[in-house]
Amino acid sequence: MNFLVILISLSILAVAIYQVRILRRINEKLIKLAAPDRDVRRIAKAQSDANWQNYRQSEFYAQLIKLLDLTSPIPSTRSWAASPDVLLTLLDHARRTSPKKILDLGSGMSTLVLAKSAPDATVFTIDHSAEFAGKTSALLASHDIKNVDLRVAPLKPHASGVDWYDTAQLDDISSIDILFIDGPPGSKNPKARHPALTECLAKLSPTAIIVIDDAGRDGERDLANEFAKALPSHTLEFLSHEKGTAVLLPK
């Protein structure tokens, strides 16, 4: 009798194992059949997001061009260069606050936008590349910009452990009303731009505005939060821009 019970139990177990294997095979086939559909949905979602971002940037770009009233060609924006959304943000703050001194870390279109938006200000712009600084200089000259102090500051080892601009190029700069941080390149080192906090904090005016590009990355977001801790008199806002923008404003 016990032998019969054991035999029946083993038979039931064998059937259960067989059913589990069948279900697994069916599930694997269903997953393979559903994968292309998921890929199509994923691609469609990515395309939709890209179209939405492209449309937003075209809106910002159209406003930017209109407000700047340009008389000469300009280089392309987006990709490694500043996007129209952050450039329009710089224009807005520069026009509304009438700054006297602006520090632009990373030269290019941002330099042109800041200089044209605040013609009474001195715009100090720092670039680690002599080649790119030359292109910025030519851009400014083509637009007859006179209020920019363009400086080449090669990257050197910084006390923080990263390579940063030669700090000697910042020694005579103080009372900064607008600080724009978009350099040095930070895609490979999340802390590449962090020395801006220690090197520029004491140089800021009490009502300074700090704008940090690429705040969609952890390194720049952390830098923005560090600035916020060091400046309790300011508020920090993260804007949903293409690359993310952090803005610190006086309360």
Image (spheres, helix red, strand yellow):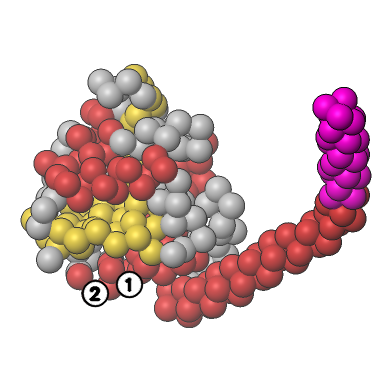
Against 105, is 101 above or below?
A: below
Q: Of helix, strand and loop, which one carries label 1?
A: helix
- Crowding at dot 1, Cα within 10 Å, few <14 / some 14-19 / many 20+, comes out as some
Give the residue number, with chain letter if any, for mark 2. Answer: 96
Q: Residue 92, which numbered label?
A: 1
Against 108, is 155 above or below?
A: above
Region of the chain picked out in magenta, as a range: 1-27
Q: Could you tell me residue 50's position as x and y percent?
A: 65, 65
Q: Of helix, strand and loop, which one carries label 2?
A: helix
Left or right placement of residue 77 versus residue 160 in this view: right
Left or right placement of residue 139 versus residue 94 in this view: right
How far is disc 1 from disc 2 in space, using C-alphas? Answer: 6 Å
Quarter of the picture containing the C terminus is bottom left
Which image quarter: residue 123?
Answer: bottom left
Assess whether residue 2 is covered by the magenta stretch.
Answer: yes
Is residue 227 in view from this perspective? Answer: yes
Q: Could you tell me residue 170's position as x and y percent?
A: 23, 36
Q: Could you tell me residue 134's position as x and y percent?
A: 48, 42
Left or right placement of residue 39 versus residue 144 in this view: right
